[in-house]
Image (cartoon, helix red, strand yellow):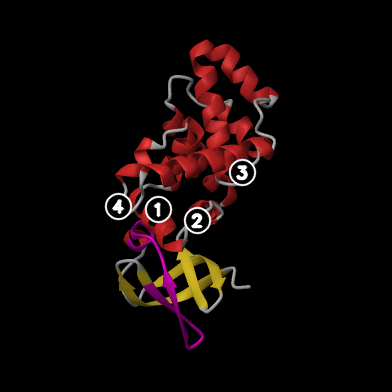
């Protein structure tokens, strides 16, 4: 299994890049968001990868963050959604936005993406919402999040819960995210809570 690639960026095109590692060039399909975050050809680059194998198709997909890779894995787990549709969605929405759309049940937003019809959009939201529920997101939040909701007023409770659910879409646990959410400004929107939590978690991991 190829977990990640780190090397020289040899080719950079819309939806496709090549990372040269030890004299071997690895071609990766990817999203426009990832391409836009990479440097110029010749610079060092790192991608988190997924090897897609189906019958006679073997393709390597790469993403600039683990969050985007997590979204890709979730999307291709939805019936009728292949890697092409998944990368198309992630080319239009960031992982934070994607997680928020699932947590809030906003299937209509996905229909604005090229190639994603209403039925597919509804299936994405319903199946991933169900997956979130089956993985213990059932509405019980940690003490830190509950305390945050209590001190910030009833209106903030839903934002905290949505942020927790969205972050769990990205693969994080309540134990990782709730203590950080509990310290954030209660006036922030759900999306801002998600972004700020991810920023603080990244900063903490770099220490």
Q: Which mark is residue 72?
A: 2
Residue 187: give x, y in percent of width and height.
43, 19
Residue visible at 48% across and 44% down in the picture: 124
Residue 142: give x, y in percent of width and height.
68, 27
Q: Which mark is residue 172?
A: 3
The span shown in magenta is: 17-35
Q: CA distance from mark 2 to mark 4?
A: 17 Å
Q: Which mark is residue 90?
A: 1
Q: Which residue is mark 4?
A: 114
Q: Nearer the viewer, residue 37 or 1?
A: 1
Give the mark nearer the N terminus: 2 vs 4: 2
Magenta highlight on residue 21: yes
Q: Is residue 199 visible?
A: no
Q: Secondary structure at mark 3?
A: loop
Q: Nearer the viewer, mark 3 or mark 1?
A: 1
The answer to whether 131 is drawn above or below residue 18 in the figure is: above
Residue visible at 51% across and 34% down in the picture: 103
Q: Nearer the viewer, mark 4 or mark 3?
A: 4
Q: CA distance from mark 3 to mark 1?
A: 19 Å
- Quarter holding the N terminus is bottom right
Q: Nearer the viewer, mark 2 or mark 4?
A: 4
The answer to whether 185 is drawn above or below residue 169 in the figure is: above
Q: Quadrant of residue 140?
A: top right
Q: Secondary structure at mark 2?
A: helix
Give the mark nearer the N terminus: 1 vs 4: 1
Q: CA distance from mark 2 to mark 3?
A: 15 Å
Q: Secondary structure at mark 1?
A: helix
Residue 127: give x, y in percent of width and height.
55, 42
């Amino acid at each position: 299994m190829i977990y990640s690639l780190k090397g020289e960026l040899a080719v950079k095109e819309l939806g496709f890049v090549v990372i040269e590692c030890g004299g071997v060039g690895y071609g990766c399909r990817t999203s426009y968001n990832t391409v836009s975050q990479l440097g110029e050809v010749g610079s060092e680059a790192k991608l988190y990868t997924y090897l897609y194998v189906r019958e006679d198709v073997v393709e390597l997909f790469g993403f600039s963050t683990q969050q985007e890779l997590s979204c890709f894995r979730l999307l291709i787990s939805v019936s009728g959604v292949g890697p092409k549709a998944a990368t198309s969605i992630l080319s239009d929405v960031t992982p934070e936005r994607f997680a928020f759309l699932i947590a809030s049940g906003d299937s209509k937003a996905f229909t604005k993406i090229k190639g994603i019809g209403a039925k597919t959009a509804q299936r994405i939201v319903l199946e991933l919402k169900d997956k979130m529920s089956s993985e213990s997101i059932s509405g019980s939040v940690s003490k830190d999040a509950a305390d945050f909701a209590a001190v910030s007023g009833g209106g903030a409770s839903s934002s905290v819960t949505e942020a927790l659910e969205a972050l769990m879409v990205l693969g994080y646990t309540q134990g990782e995210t709730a203590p950080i959410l509990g310290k954030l400004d209660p006036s922030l929107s759900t999306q801002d809570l998600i972004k700020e939590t991810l920023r603080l978690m990244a900063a903490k991991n770099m220490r």
